[in-house]
Image (cartoon, helix red, strand yellow):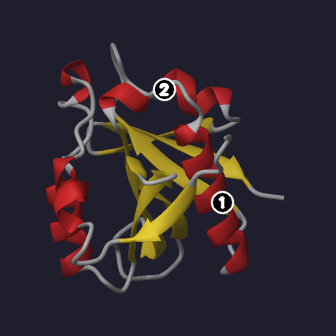
Amino acid sequence: MLTVPRLEKISPSNVDAAIALKVRPDQEHLVAPVAHSLAEAYARPDVAWPRLICDGDRIVGFLMAFFDIDFAGDGTGTDIRYGLWRLNIAAGEQGRGYGRFAVQAVAAEIRRRGGARLTVCWHPGENGPEDFYLGLGFRLTGEMSGDQRVGELELS
């Protein structure tokens, strides 16, 4: 039976499974572990939106979106953005459309909140997600966020 992926909130009943989720070993240097992301979500509940990606009864990934972040960080509010903060797809679940589903789900939530573009940052290099994001229609902005490239997807 074909199932449709869904997002679930992090809860006491699934937090241990969320923390146990691991990307491929060759990708570990590219994305923070779920436990780190959950700590950031705890510290920034005003902007963080952590969710598990589930398929049936299996947890296949984790995402964390952000809403209303002052991307420039200068307090002026001139560069407010919405986007995908983290995306961790379990090592054995990659290549099955869960990443695409995650991006589409975040885009839908951004639209629901009145946003018009989705921002994402990634580490460039081997085994990185650049081809994935560019293949979904993101464009490089030319900006860097630390050592990460910044991409945007216009939402219509």
Who is closer to the viewer here, 137 or 96? 96
Q: Is residue 30 above or below residue 102?
A: above
Residue reaching furthest right? 156
Q: Is mark 2 on a helix, strand or loop?
A: helix
Type of amino acid under label 1: Ala
Who is closer to the viewer here, 155 or 53? 53
Who is closer to the viewer here, 101 or 107? 101
Type of amino acid under label 2: Glu
Give residue 44's position: percent from left, percent from top.
27, 79
Q: How many labels does the image show?
A: 2
Rendering quarter of residue 50: bottom left
Q: In the rendered image, which quarter contains the N terminus? A: top right
Residue in the image at 23% along x and 60% along y: 37
Residue reaching furthest front? 1
Residue in the image at 27% along x and 33% along y: 23
Q: Is residue 95 above or below residue 145?
A: above
| Residue named by callout 2 | 130
| Residue named by callout 1 | 107
Contact (Cβ within 8 Å) of mark 2 with mark 1? no
12 relative position to 5: left or right:
left
In this orientation, does residue 150 appear?
yes
Mark positioned earlier in the residue sequence (2 or 1): 1
Residue reaching furthest top? 126
Q: How crowded is mark 1: few (under 14 residues within 10 Å), some or many (20 or more)?
A: many
Q: How far apart are marks 2 and 1 (CA)?
A: 18 Å
Rendering quarter of residue 65: bottom left
15 relative position to 104: left or right:
left
36 relative position to 46: left or right:
left
Q: Is mark 1 on a helix, strand or loop?
A: helix
Residue in the image at 51% along x and 63% along y: 7
